[in-house]
Amino acid sequence: MSVEFIPRKPLSKEQTRLNTLITKHENWLAGRKGGKRLDLTGKDLSDMVFSHRNLSGAIFVRANLCDAKLADTNLRDADFTGANLTRADLGGSIANGALFVKANLTNARLVQTKLRDANLTEASLIGAQIGHSDATDTNFCGVNFSGAHFSCVHCTRTNFRGATFVSTQFSFCDFRSADLTNTDFTDSTYIASSFSKTWR
C-alpha cells in the first residue's frame, strides 16, 4: 500500500524572520557571537509559533500574541506586561519569574505550565484552562478568572488577593496556603478542592 506524501507548508516570511530573531536571542543567552536579546515590544505576533525555543528573558511588552503557539517553551523571566495572549497556548512551558502584569490571557491554555514566582497582577484569565500547573509563590492579585477551569493546580503561598472567580470551575485543587482575601467566588463549582482560612 502506497503512502501519499504531503509536503510541509512553507514558513511565512514573518515566521522565518521571527525564527532568525529567536536564534539570535538563544545565542545571546549562550554568550555566543552575534547574539541579541529578543525585544518584540508592541509587535503583532498573532498566530506565530515559538514552541520548543528558549525565550528566557525575552521582552514582549504590549505585543499582540493572540493565538500564538508558546507550548513547551522556556519563558523564564520573560516580560509580557500588557501583552495580548488571547487563546495563546502556553501548555508545558516554564514561565517561572515571568511578568504578565495586566496581560490579556482570555481563553489561554496553561496546562502543565510552571508559573512559580510569576507576576500576573491585574491580568485577565477569563475562560482560561489552568491544569496540572505549579503556581507556587505566584502573584495573581486582582486577576479576573471568571469562567476559567482550574484542575490539579498547586497553589502554595499563592497571592489571589482581590481576584474574581465568578462561574469558575475547580477540581482537585489545594488553596489552603493561598491568600484569598477579598476574592469573589460567586456561582463557582468545586470538586475535591480545599481552601484556606483567608477565603474572603
Image: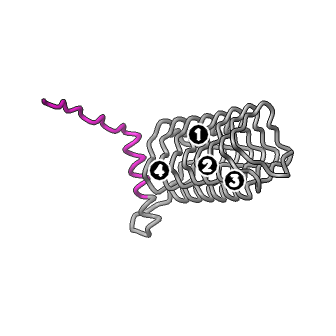
Q: Which residues are magenta?
A: 1-24
Q: Residues within 10 Å of mark 4 (few under 14, many from 20)?
A: some
Q: Quadrant of residue 66?
A: top right
Residue 71 x %, y %: 48, 46
Q: CA distance from mark 1 to mark 4?
A: 16 Å
Q: Which residue is mark 4?
A: 72
Which residue corresponds to the image point at 84% horizontal and 47% vertical from the top-left?
199
Residue carrying label 2: 80
Element type at mark 1: loop
**What's the residue at 56%, 35% (across, down)?**
87
Residue 48 included in the magenta stretch of the image: no
| Distance CA(mark 4)–CA(mark 3) | 21 Å
Instruction: Please name which of the two marks, 4 or 3, marks the residue nearer to the observer.
Output: 3
Task: Say what amino acid the circle numbered 3 marks.
Answer: Cys
Graded by Cα atoms within 10 Å as few (under 14), some (14 to 19) or many (20 or more), the crowding at tag 3 reads many
Of the two numbered discs 2 and 3 in the rendering, the one whose residue sits closer to the viewer: 3
